[in-house]
Amino acid sequence: MSILCDKNTKLLIQGMGRMGRLHAGFSKDYGTQVVGGIAPGKGGQEIDGIPVYDTVAEAVKDTGANASVIFVPPPGAADAILEAADAGLDVTACITEGIPAIDMMRAKAALRGSSMRLVGPNCPGVVTPEQCRIGIMPAKITKPGPVGVVSRSGTLTYEAVDQLSRLGIGQSTCVGIGGDPVIGTTFVDALALFEADPETKAVVMIGEIGGSAEETAAEFVQSNMSKPVVSFIAGQNAPPGKRMGHAGAIIAGGQGKASDKMAALEKAGVAVSVSPAEIGETLANHVPELRP
């Protein structure tokens, strides 16, 4: 069992521009079932051997697709998310960066009651090692195993996964939830999925400054998690009022500081790494039975 995607996932590419085509190819090469692309006005064609449809609904009807990845530019990305939900997909990962917050607020409100799981936006997507790749994550650094990885930062997701793999500690599923202020899947959502997944024995959670998602996650860990959790918080030296890459990574009004997040996590029993270079070792030391 894996969360979000596995070898049975049938993936659509929403947005068959240069980036969509590039990563469709990488996903196919990894073994993911890429069953169609969405490019309005180009239905009936093939692009790089992938059948193209005008709408997600047409593609689902024809291919049985149950997931998608969105490479649609910011002005149309929120509508692409809703189109995926309306078509009945189980999960979609939105890679698009720069979607207006007001568009995402409207989309998130419209998704209430929907059974679709949204990952992102502004995220690297999801990889279940040797089974499925949805998004832009470098899947070749992953290794099948018992550690779930969830992160607001794309590059730190890759860093943590690479460290674990080099230590011989594999991953169950790797999830980049994105760094925007309004996202679909939260830390708590991902932690709950990992807690319920029998293949996951421990979790690495990578947060960053800004907002209160990590403090909320700490409360969830303390009350609901039986599995060990290791964390790292990026932006420990960031000055107040200065954005750190992501739209949501900003200390404002005295809130969102790394030190507060780290303290909340440690209070909840989470082992917190003080350096991004020590995430893997922190997990290995905290859960030594996972070392090969």
Image: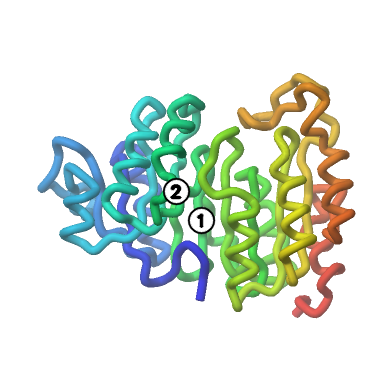
Mark earlier in primary sequence (1, 2): 2
Q: CA distance from mark 1 to mark 2?
A: 8 Å
State the SS at label 2.
Answer: strand
Q: Residue at coordinates 83% horizontally, 75% vertically from top-left?
A: 288
The residue tagged 1 is 126
Task: Please state which amino acid type lies under the numbered disc 1.
Answer: Val
State the SS at label 1.
Answer: strand
Q: Are marks 1 and 2 in contact (CB under 8 Å)?
A: yes
Quadrant of image for the C terminus: bottom right
- Residue 118 locus on image (x, y percent): 46, 49
Farthest residue, direction top: 241
Relative to the observer, which residue lies in front, 41 or 181? 181
The residue tagged 2 is 93
Apparent side of residue 237 relative to residue 31 in the rendered image (left or right): right
Apparent side of residue 251 relative to residue 37 in the rendered image (left or right): right
- Sort mark 2 into few (<14), some (14-19) or many (20+) by Cα contacts within 10 Å: many
- Residue 94 locus on image (x, y percent): 44, 43
Task: Please state which amino acid type lies under the numbered disc 2.
Answer: Ala
Q: Quadrant of residue 290?
A: bottom right
- Sort mark 1 into few (<14), some (14-19) or many (20+) by Cα contacts within 10 Å: many
- Image vertical order of residue 218 relative to residue 54, above or below: below
Q: Which circle marks residue 194 in the picture? A: none
- Residue 45 locus on image (x, y percent): 13, 46
